[in-house]
Image (spheres, rainbow, N blue to C red):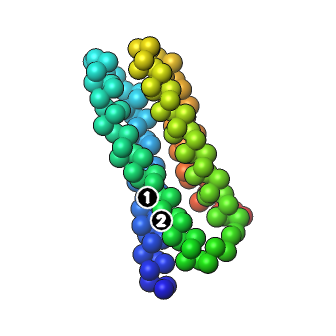
Amino acid sequence: MEQSYHFFLALHLYSLYASGFLMFFYLILTQGSFKTEFIFIRRIRLFLPIYYTFLAFMLFTGLLLLAMKKFQMSLNFWLMIAAWILILFLAIFHFVQFKKARKIRRYIAFRWISLLILMCEILLLFLPSLLSNYL
C-alpha cells in the first residue's frame, strides 16, 4: 500500500509540474507572434487536448491519493481541490473566450484575457504546495 501511494504521489507531482510547464507553454503560444490567423488558431487547437489531458490526469491521481488516505481531509487537500476547481473554471472560461475571438476574428482582447487567465492558473497550480510549507 505504501509503495503504491508513493508511486501515485510521484505521478501526481509529475502531472503537476507538467501542467505548469504546459500552462507556461500555452502562455507563450497565445502571447507569441504569429504570421497568420490560421497558424495562431491551429497552434492553440492542437495544443488544448494535451493541456486538458494533463489537467484530467492531475485530477485522477489526486483523487487516487485521496482515496489511499481514506478520504481524511486536511487543509492542504481542501486547498488543492479548491485550486483545481478554479483552474477548471478558468480553463472553461478561457476556451469560451477563444471560441468568441475566433468567431469575430478579434484576437487582441483574447491575448490580454489569455495572459491574465494563464497567470492566475499558474499561481493557483502552485499555491497549495507553497502554502502547505507555511501552514
The residue that appears at 47% across and 33% down in the rendered structure is 95
Image location of residue 101, percent across then percent down: 45, 20
Above or below, 1 relative to 116:
below
Identify the element where label 2 is drawn. Answer: helix
Relative depth, front residue between 13 and 1? 1
Report the number of numbered marks: 2
Residue 61, numbered label: 2
Measuring 43% from the left and 58% from the top, which residue is drawn there?
A: 57
- At mark 1, the secondary structure is helix
Q: Is residue 17 above or below residue 45?
A: below
Nearest to the observer: residue 76 or residue 71: 71
Say the numbered circle drawn on residue 57. 1
Q: Amino acid at mark 2?
A: Thr
Amino acid type at image mark 1: Phe
> Residue at point 65% right, 53% down?
82
Residue density around tag 1, few if under 14, some if 14–19, many if 20 or more, within 10 Å: some
Label 1 vs label 2: CA separation? 6 Å
Residue 115 position in % (x across, y down)? 51, 30
Given residues 77 and 35, the one toward you in this image is 77
- Left of 118 or right of it: where is 29? left
Marks 1 and 2 in Cβ contact (< 8 Å): yes
Snapshot quadrant of residue 22 = top left
The spot of residue 51 in percent (x, y) is 40, 45
**Residue 110 point in image, percent of width and height:** 48, 22
